[in-house]
Every structure is written in C-alpha cells, then in structure tokens.
Amino acid sequence: MPFLGKAPGVSTVTVSDDAITTAKIADNAITSAKIGVDVIVAEDLAANSVTVSEITDDAVTQAKIADEAVDEARLQISNAGSNGQFLSKQSGNTGGLTWADAGQWSATTEGLVTTTQGQNNIDFTIPADVNQIKVVFYGLSQVSTELFKIKVGNASGTIKGSGYYGNTSSYWYNGNAPSLTENNDAIQLNGWTPAGNYWYGSLNMESIGMDGRRWSYFMAPYNDTYGEYFTVCNGRIALDSGEQIRKIRFTTDSGNGYDSGCHIKVYTAKF
C-alpha cells in the first residue's frame, strides 16, 4: 500500500521539476507577501498591462519623468499657437496657459471707428492683464463748444469719473504765457472747448506692474486750427483694488458728441 507519512530519517521531501503546475495553485492563493522584493521585473509585465487605473493619483513624481520627456502635446494649452509666440499665464483659459504674441500691439475688437455726426460715448474694449494702451485719433473734433474727454472703465463696464484721475494740462506758443490747469475727472486738454478744433495724435498709457490698476499717461496732439500752439496733458490713473482698465471711452462734457469722419483706434500690448 502507498506510504502516507514521513519516512523515518527523511527530513525533507524533494519535489521534482515542474511538479507544481498552474492547476495546483488555488485562485488568489499567491499574495503580495509571497512575492519577493524586485522579483517582478519589466520582462514579467505584459505589453500594455499597466493601465491608468493601476496608477494612484499623484504617483508619478517629477523624478519619474525623464529629461526632455514632456513635449507641447502633453501640456494643456488653450490655443494652437504659431511660430514666434510665447507661453503665457492666462488663468481664465483652459489649462491656464495660452500662446500669445511677444510684445506685439493688437487692435481692440472694435477696430477702426469712424464717427457719425453727434456720436458720443465711443467705447473700446481692453483685454485683461495688458500693461500698455495706445489710443490713436485723427481729425477728432467736437460738434459744439465743449471739451473732449477720454475716460476709463472697469470689467463691469463702470466708467470712472471724479477722483480717479490726476490730469495736468498745459498749452503755450511763442510770445505768450503758458497755461497750466489740473483736473481729476478725465484725461483732457483743458481750455480747448471751441468746435472746429481738429486733433491729430495719440494717448500713450503704461501700467506699473501687471495688475492693470495703476497707470501713467502722456498725450501731446496737434491742432489743425492752432498749429502754432503746443498742447500737452499727462497724469495718472488709480482704480480701486482688484480692478483693471477694461474700457476706454471717448466722450464730451456736454454730451453732444463728435463730428462725422473722426477716426479712432485703440491698441493694447503686454510686455
């Protein structure tokens, strides 16, 4: 009959090669404790066997990524981009990254505005986070005897008035004492109210830092009617905390607007 116990004097039982087959191993019988450290190597993994579900959140650290392994396709960028652009932080866009032009002036969405007779409160939309604004006008003239003014607005569309500006305006010509006036309600050339004054020039605005709240500016346009005069204004704008300039408005203090055929265009940039 078969021997069922250990033979006297025998301390071990020798198992022949290939004696333990897959059929001899119960399902779920091999636990992680039975697998030695560094036993499973790359050659033991089937192709495509490690899936996303096997990788825990935040398990892939910077040290696990090879140098020069992350290319453009692996970054979440909000637009396609083109040659010469740089990658900029845009928190409101998909992925928070956007290809943008490097220091290039861009016209606002309104493009070139050619005024109609009596047109007033002409608005231009300023993108978020710019730090340069250039306002260009050609043949600008008021319908009636009143000042032309340039004002700014915030993201909600509120146009800022008294207290937000520090504007110094001056004009002079040969042989005459200069005029110097200050105001705090708009960017303007004080004293130049007559209708029929045609203005040609630009307003240049710069923001200190990148918050879009604090600005300085300078404007020295030419006047067709009084070409022998030199006119200039400069100053600063300080919006409330958390605000940015998001609108430029051309207006007149009596609300009668501008003559037809005036040309206005606004450019912005981020340097």
Image: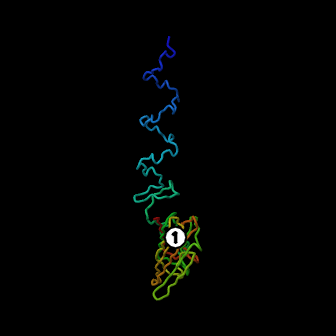
Vertical order, 134 against 77 (above or below): below
State the residue position of label 1.
Answer: 215
User: Residue 268: image x %, image y %?
Assistant: 48, 67
- The colour mode here is rainbow
Residue 6 visible in the picture: yes
Give the farthest residue toward the top: 1
* On-image quarter of the C terminus: bottom left
Vertical order, 48 against 188 (above or below): above
Q: Which amino acid is tagged 1? A: Trp
User: Residue 34: image x %, image y %?
Assistant: 50, 31
- How many numbered badges does the structure rendering display? 1
Give the farthest residue toward the front: 9
Vertical order, 177 against 78 (above or below): below
For the residue carrying disc 1, how many other residues have a C-alpha within 10 Å: few (<14), some (14-19), or many (20+)? many
User: Residue 127: image x %, image y %?
Assistant: 51, 64
Query: For this rendering, which residue is in front, 150 or 174?
Result: 174
Task: For mark 1, give the secondary structure.
Answer: strand
Residue 193 visible in the picture: no
Query: For this rendering, which residue is in front, 269 or 150?
Result: 269
Give the farthest residue toward the bottom: 175
Please report the residue visible at 51 percent of the width from the left and 32 percent of the height from the top: 33
User: Residue 130: image x %, image y %?
Assistant: 49, 65
